[in-house]
Every structure is written in C-alpha cells, then in structure tokens.
Amino acid sequence: MKYIYLSSLMIAFSTVFFMGCENAEYKAQTNSLYITDAADIATAATITMDDGADINVVVRLAQKVTEDVEVEIQFVPELLTEYNTISGTEYEVLPANMLPQNATVTIPAGEISANYRLHVNDFATNGITYAIPLALGNVIKGDVTKSKAQSKFIYVLAKPLNVSAPVLRGNAGNVSTLPATDWGITVDAWTLEAWVRMDGYSINNQAIFTSGSNDHEIYIRFGDANRPYNYLQIKSLGGQKQTASDLEANTWYHWAFVYNGTTLTIYRNGKQDTFFDPPAPKGGSVRFDFMKIVDSGSYFRNNCTMSQVRLWKVARTESEIANNMYFEVNPKNPNLIALWPMDEGEGTAFRDATGNGHDATSNGALQKWEHNIRFDK
C-alpha cells in the first residue's frame, strides 16, 4: 500500500471542502482533537490497495493532557456526497459491512496522539473508486473539544492496474472496432487515453490511432518526416502538433489527447506536454464515425503494446487524467464513448466494457500477450 497525492486542482477542491466557512479553525485550537491527515488541508492522498489496505488514522491533541481522551470514529456518507459535488468526482462509499462498528480511539494520559488502524480486505472494485468518509464523533472521555475543520477526512481507495496486454504490429494488420463506419457520434469536446509501449521508433508514420470522420480527422502517430522518429504527433482538424524527440524504446507512456472545443492538448504521464489551437471544426463539432488502432500498414514495423484505451465525449482535466491513469475507471460513466481495457489475456477480441457496442478485433496485428503488467512500478 502507498499514498499517491492528488494533483493541484483536486487539492484546491479539497481546500474548499474541508475549510468551508470555518476559516477560523484552519489551525488546531488549544486542547482540541484533530486528524493529522487533515492538519494540512492543502494535501489529499489516494490510498493504493495491494492485497487490501491498512489505513492508519492518527488522532492528535493540540496539547498533552493529564487524563485519557477517548473519541468516537464515525463513517459519514454525507461527507462524500458533498465532496463529490465540489470536486466533480464519482467516488462511492465503501459498503457498511466492510467498516467497523462503534469504533473509538483513546489517547492515553500524557500522550499527544494515538493511532486507529482501519483494515480493508482486498475486493474487486470493477472500475468503481470507493472512499471512506471518516470523522471524529463525540468526545467520550476528556475535557477537550474537536477541531471542526480538521476532524473529518476522506480516504480514497484505488486498486492499481495489474493487467495483460496485447503486443501489436501494424504491418501485419490492424485493430478495427464496431461498427466499422458511421458511428455518427457528434461531440463538442473529447479525450482519448491509452498506455502505450513501443519497442523502437525505427520508421516514421507508425499510427497508433486513426479516428474521427472524413470531415474531422484524428491521426496519431510516432514520427513524421524529421529524424529521429522517437516523437509523437497528432494531426487533427487541419492542424498538427508533436512532442520532443525524446521517447525511449521499451518504456511505458500514458498518453492523453484532449480537445476542449478550442485547444488540443497532449498529456504525457499525467502532465501537459504540448498543445495547439487547430482550425475550428466543420459544423462547429467533431464527429466520430470509426476507430482503428495500429493502422498505418507497412509503415508500422515496430511492436506496440497497448492497454486501457479510453474514449470520452468530454475534455478530461489534467487532474482527472493523472488521478485515474494507474487505476480502472467505471465503465458505466456516461461520458465514456468506448472503453477497451485490452486485458483479455488471450484471443483476438477486445471488448468495449461500456456496453456501447464498440467491440474491437485484431485483424492479424496481434503478435502475443504479455501478463502481470503494473504501470505504477
């Protein structure tokens, strides 16, 4: 288990949530109880589950006292509802049967803090991100009060991806999706994400994605006319932009391409890499009619291993990309057009986990499967 700290945008949301109208209590007051994780409210953490998780909730006094102090530990779903509304997240409360009942923590006389250990057994998340909204309850023993601003905290649980992934080569075929044409999906904004590993960049025009429509091209490839070819380029709406020529062979990269109606941004490993403003799309919106993967024929000579292809009908934020790239996303999210986990581990078919019917098939491109892949290590 480890902590992954949320990005600056989520931190800003967290600040609003925890402070509310209680600015006077930003600092713990004399003889007050607080949760140490909430002491610096500009920092939030997602807890990564590996075979379950142990959460150490440290309850602390502002000053030592000469008597035992006992306080309730409560689980408050309403905190998560408010947090989701402010932050734009879709976290769900961990089921009550996985949480302890009547929990308390006691700080012995003369001590400054005590630890409450909360164990969560491993379980299948099925793409849902669960959270534990925790708060200090009634002070059972001791002449102290609890800090209002620092007595509540939300622990987000995330299970890191551990997947199988296909090794593909485009000069042997491609990966096509259903239906082959005429999706007829018109959007004002979109996002395309994927984990990609190339075993080399030996030739130009190795296209990992070809999508959009005749009027709204989306063409993403490694290498154009300029050597060396170890850069990624996107062509769309009559414009194009590329990264620096610094990509390394046999290295996993998380790529995200985000169009917000004006600007098209490339994110590398959860951080903005480059951007440009393409010409306005014909008709004012972008139409998706198809999606093909590793689709540049004889030009695609290197092996490409790919995972977690996500196509959205919204412009995902940098924090949403960074906070979800190592984890599953909920396939029932209404903003997903298609989600190809590409984790079947065998065969030549790749399901669209959304149920929207855009299942994919390898047409000779699949070379082999690799297993037990972790992107966070």
Image (cartoon, rainbow, N blue to C red):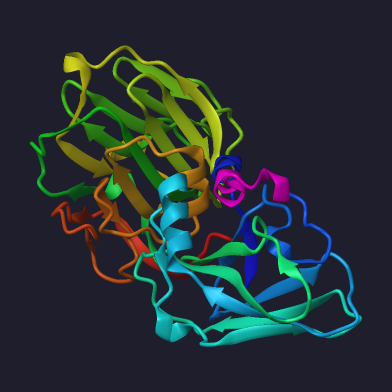
Residue 262 drawn above or below residue 43: above
- Relative side of 192 to 181, left or right: right
What secondary structure characterizes most of the magenta part? helix
Specify start and end residues of the magenta stretch as a single range. Answer: 14-25
Residue 263 drawn above or below residue 177: above
Q: Which residue is drawn at the image coordinates 48% and 61% (left, top)?
A: 79
- Relative side of 11 to 128, left or right: right
Q: Quadrant of the C terminus?
A: bottom right
Q: Nearer the viewer, residue 39 or 219?
A: 39
Residue 210 is inside the magenta segment: no
Residue 151 drawn above or below residue 187: below
Task: Pinpoint residue 80: horizontal percent, then vertical percent.
Answer: 45, 60
Q: Which residue is drawn at the image coordinates 65% and 55% (left, top)?
A: 149
- Relative side of 85 to 351, left or right: right
Q: Nearer the viewer, residue 107 or 272?
A: 107
Q: Nearer the viewer, residue 229 or 67?
A: 67
